[in-house]
Image (cartoon, helix red, strand yellow):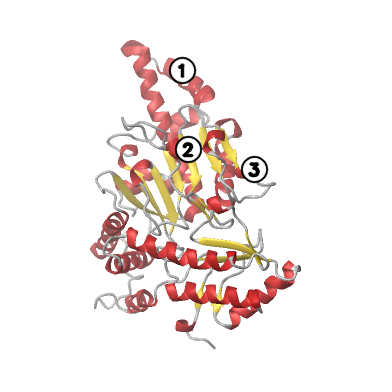
Amino acid sequence: MPSRADITYFGAGPAALPTDVLETAAQALLDYQGTGLGIAEHSHRSELAAKIINEAKADLATYLDFSPDQYEVLFMQGGGTGEFAASMYNLVGAWVTRQHAAVQKELGEGAAADEAQVLAALRQRVESDLKVDYIVTGSWSLKAYQEAVRLLGPEHVNLVCDARTINDGKFGKIPDESTWKLSKDAAYVYFCDNETVDGVEFPNFPKILEPKEDGTGPIVVADMSSNILSRRIPVNNYSLLFFGAQKNLGCTGVAVAILKRTFLPPTLSQPSPALLRKLALPIPPIVLQYEIIAKNNSLYNTLSIFDVYIAGQVLKKLLATFPNGVDGQQALAEKKAELIYSALEAHPEAYKIVPDKSARSKMNICFRVIKGGNVDEAEKAFLKESTAINLTGLKGHRSVGGIRASNYNSIPLEGAEKLAKFIHEFAKA
């Protein structure tokens, strides 16, 4: 049987973790810092737990280069899928709060005391103006869009674009921004920065969503579950970005939300459940309400401190490896992706890269093996032979098939080189 050192694991998630991080964590599970208790046994209310959370928050801000004074880091439960709902609940709630204040101001002091009049005007705004915008470029943004429709209602959810309409019914391209149908003053605009299943990644932040010189502009939400920590991102362009930890940050069990503080008290508070009920809008579960989680430093309910500890150790390793932060990791990620894509492009008779070149992901490299004409048999052979030399986790997502090499931060340069060499050899054999 192969040892851990022999394996290069290209699985899409959970991803491999650095061996030295796991070794440190294994000891921490038995006895954390000489306390006689493992880290998973300590109270989440302890000073020890608070220190782990606060250090992870600070290291994340340092690595991604954003200000903790402007953004709050929340450790959430429910994964990225839970954040589909959480992002909708909280940003629709913020929209309602802003509209409520605007109605009261417009009606004036006397009328503002008339609750029925305010409520009627607010209901009218909800019915006519409440829109949330979704840019659908792959399987995960589609799921987020569908969740918004399910929870909020189709009348309030605007499909900005569906990438399948420009690619023969399949995902693989990002529609030109000139074709996007954005709502006026949407409660938010949502996109998935990297589509894990389909191998589609936004090459840059969309220009149409950039803030204006005066700082105004769309309220932007992004799912960055599978490319976070792999490249520099303009955090200040976002009101909210979230990601599951199990790709580049840690292990399954915790998700992270980075939220602009202007969406939190004292600047803004969520509407009361009573008001939402009167407006026929959904009321969020309390564990998905960002202001509650922020107020309690992510400890409203029992958080897996062990999962946060793993994430914190990964961040410390990244900061030690790359003194210039995420820029160093980005250069390495681009070099690895280029090796693999170049190997595939060198053999057009054997491989077909799935996404368009303009939207290729550097994290999830999706392709088909077309050598010999029988794709199914060729891919079975590719997977069998690659596994035999300890290149594992290459099978594509069950919904689309094919081959997928997930080039996460845990993949060393040598691993990418080994895969590129195998791609060449398999094509020539």
Residue type beneath disc 3? Ile
Picture coordinates of residue 89 (x, y %)?
Answer: 46, 40
Mark 3 is surrounded, within 10 Å at the Cα level, by few (under 14), some (14 to 19) or many (20 or more) other residues, namely: some
Give the residue number, with chain letter if any, for mark 1. Answer: 121
Q: CA distance from mark 1 to mark 2?
A: 25 Å
Judged left or right of residue 300, residue 349 is right
Residue 3 visible here: yes
In the figure, residue 122 lies in which quadrant? Answer: top left
Which residue in the rendered view is the most extreme toward the top?
A: 110
As drawn, 426 above or below 314: below
Residue name at image x 24 percent, y 62 percent: 51
Question: Which residue in the structure is indicated by mark 2?
Answer: 189
Q: Residue at x 59, y 67 (%)?
A: 346
Q: Secondary structure at mark 1?
A: helix
Mark 3 and mark 1 in contact? Answer it, CB < 8 Å. no
Residue 284: image location, x then y, percent: 46, 41
> Horizontally, is 74 left or right of 146 in the view?
left
**Of the two numbered discs 1 and 2 in the rendering, the one whose residue sits closer to the viewer:** 2
Residue 353, percent across and down? 61, 60
Quarter of the image for residue 315 reads: bottom left
Considering the image in quadrants, where does the N terminus appear?
bottom right
